[in-house]
Amino acid sequence: MLKWAIIFAVISLITGLMGFRGVAGVTGTIAKVLFAIFLILFLIALLAVIGVFHIL
């Protein structure tokens, strides 16, 4: 997930530099959404691991 967020962010930067603002905006939004999903899943996994080891 993080890999795809980085890829879309790089595409957004490149297309923004080339002047394609529409494509840059769309890919930037996709990168933000993917990064947010990554953070939420990461925090859920982290809390699950902390919960499992706290019980032991």
Image (cartoon, helix red, strand yellow):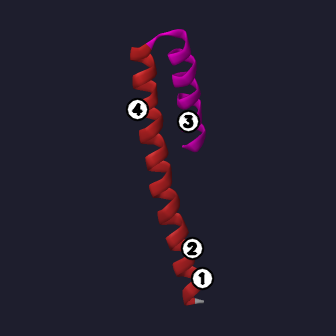
Relative depth, front residue between 52 and 12: 12
Q: Position of residue 4 (x, y in %)?
A: 56, 35
> Alpha-carbon distance for marks 2 and 4?
30 Å
> Contact, CB < 8 Å: mark 1 with mark 2?
yes
2 or 4: mark nearer the eye: 4
- Label 1 residue SS: helix
Q: Quadrant of the C terminus?
A: bottom right
> Contact, CB < 8 Å: mark 1 with mark 3?
no
> Image quadrant of residue 32?
top left
Q: Position of residue 28 (x, y in %)?
A: 45, 29
- Please report the residue visible at 60 percent of the width from the left and 82 percent of the height from the top: 53
> Alpha-carbon distance for marks 4 and 1?
36 Å
Q: Residues within 10 Å of mark 3 (few under 14, many from 20)?
A: few
- Please report the residue visible at 55 percent of the width from the left and 23 percent of the height from the top: 13
- Please report the residue visible at 40 percent of the width from the left and 24 percent of the height from the top: 26
- Label 2 residue SS: helix
**What range of the chain is rendered magenta?**
1-20
Q: Quadrant of the N terminus?
A: top right
> Alpha-carbon distance for marks 4 and 3?
12 Å
Q: Residues within 10 Å of mark 2 (few under 14, many from 20)?
A: few
In this rendering, position of residue 35 left or right of residue 2: left
Q: Is residue 4 located in the magenta-colored stretch of the structure?
A: yes
Residue that badge 3 annotates? 4
Residue that badge 4 annotates? 29
> Contact, CB < 8 Å: mark 2 with mark 4?
no
Residue that badge 2 annotates? 49
Residue that badge 1 annotates? 53
- Label 4 residue SS: helix
> Alpha-carbon distance for marks 1 and 2?
6 Å
- The relative height of residue 16 versus residue 6 in the rendered view (above or below) is above
- Please report the residue visible at 58 percent of the width from the left and 18 percent of the height from the top: 14
